[in-house]
Image (tube, grey):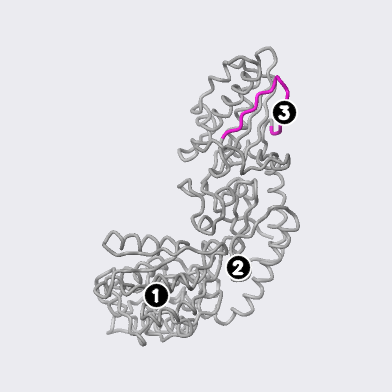
Amino acid sequence: MEFPIFMDNHSTTPVDPRVMEVMIPYFTKAFGNSASRNHSFGWEAEKAVDRARGQIAQLLHCQAKEIIFTSGATESNNLAIKGAAEMYHEKGNHIITVVTEHKAVLDSAKRLERDGFEVTYLPVESDGLVSLEAVKDAITDKTILISIMMANNEIGVIQPIAEIGVIAKEKGVLFHCDATQGVGKIPVDVQAMGVDLLSLSAHKIYGPKGIGALYVRKRNPRVRIAPLIDGGGHERGMRSGTLNIPGIVGLGEACEICEKEMTEEAARMKRMQQRLQSLIMEGLDEVYLNGHGEKRLPQNLNMSFAYVEGESLLMGLKEIALSSGSACTTASLEPSYVLRALGVGSDLAHSSLRFGLGRFNTDEEVDYVAKRVIETVIRLREMSPLYEMAKEGIDLKSVQWAEH
Amino acid sequence: MSYSNKVIDHYNNPRNMGSLDKADESVGTGIVGAPECGDVMKLQLKVENGVIEDAKFKTFGCGSAIASSSLATEWVKGKTIDEAFAIKNVEIVSELNLPPVKIHCSVLAEDAIKAAIADYRNKNGED
């Protein structure tokens, strides 16, 4: 086993060596600009881009022409939401999204609010799922866009995308899906799911950082979005700028590998996820799973360890890369807004860990991580006044805490 | 966030972690913070002839909170009550090299010392 162990694959993933291998020639030899129409360097680059578009399209079940390359999912989300808002603002000024979305979606929506749009932020149930009734009820004749993620980056819950797609179609509202955490991990079919715009990123699926894509539907309906970046009119005018050829090649290859290996990989991830969960739950009491038990990515496990604070837990697990919903791991002092939206108390939100399994994790690592988590939680509970009080039978909810 | 070596040392080898008998007349107990805020400190002092003979802590919180309270127990031992009362959070900040985002941990440790002293004084009619 090599240290440190990386089990934070929702934050990013290592580039698959097979992906890097196909990228390398595009840095030094086939370095052309795909917009150069008059020489072989340009043609070779264009060929590479076309191939990658095809690889991505195959994974999403769309046409190659419907793929717009961006710098990553943050840009894709911004482009989809702000681009659609600008293009369709005469039709309406209402957008629907969900409180547990990624900040790239929420902050795009917030900016539009400042520009006069109205945004409905739907709540989620305690399992992290949005209710279809709530989506339906939120739609008005002013609604132009619904933006709901496929899988959540913290708790891994998978939203009912196909069902939301049906609702959006019925009402004639565009549907954007931030599928950054879903693509490559679970089957995605933009036709079957009724998605009109879909964001993805390479570095979450063993591709390089700095490259992503936005699927923009061309038919039924033909979706148009205003660009955020003006320039040479690349990417059908929706995203100007010289294409990042090595990145695009890497993204394409990453998608192809995911498509070929998804069934086998998902089964392996599921097995590891269940093993990790059951080992930890057998070893400790008062551990709570955050998010729906079944409707979640096979790679994800998010748990709260009562009476122990997440950052100190991570500190005790320094040879393992994980993340926590504790405020202390970020610049703000508020704990995870995603967990709070599920109704998880602030105390348990501070006590959460996110495990993100990935392609390169092993069973041996899962066993090691479970063992270390158990040890560390036990050690920190010994140190925790809350655990001591709970063991004395004091109801912590009844204590008058001096909030600070 | 990277931690100073001193914070890591206190986290790995907490000084005076544990509990004293809170019913003991010579023991003052201070519990500060709130679970919702992500940190709760319990600091206890055992006072003999006006001098703090022993101190214990238990902390729910980040590494800096654990280190701040661990350091506080180290510092108060052997001090008179008045000397302990005079300990300032900024001294903890500088000893542990706490970054600005962790200053509240040192404030909490100072509060915990004062709360424990107040409890002791209260028990012994020294308000």
In this view, the mark in front (3 or 2): 3
| Tag 1 residue | A214
Residue lying at 38% horizontally and 75% vertically, measured from the top left: A69
- Residue interval drawn in magenta: B17-32
Q: Amino acid at mark 2?
A: Gln
Q: Does any portion of residue A128 appear in the rendered image?
A: yes
The residue closer to the viewer here, A260 or B68, is: B68
Single out the residue that lies furthest toward the right: A282
Say if A279 sits above or below A377 in the image.
below
Q: Position of residue A372 (x, y in %)?
A: 70, 53
The residue closer to the viewer here, A306 or A76, is: A306
Q: Assign the magenta stretch its main secondary structure.
A: loop
Q: Secondary structure under badge 2? A: loop
In this view, the mark in front (1 or 3): 3
Relative side of A280 to B103, left or right = right
Packing grade of label 3 (10 A; few <14, some 14-19, many >=20) is some
| Tag 2 residue | A299
Packing grade of label 1 (10 A; few <14, some 14-19, many >=20) is many
Residue lying at 38% horizontally and 64% vertically, measured from the top left: A120
Q: CA distance from mark 1 to mark 2?
A: 23 Å
Relative side of A153 to B56, left or right = left
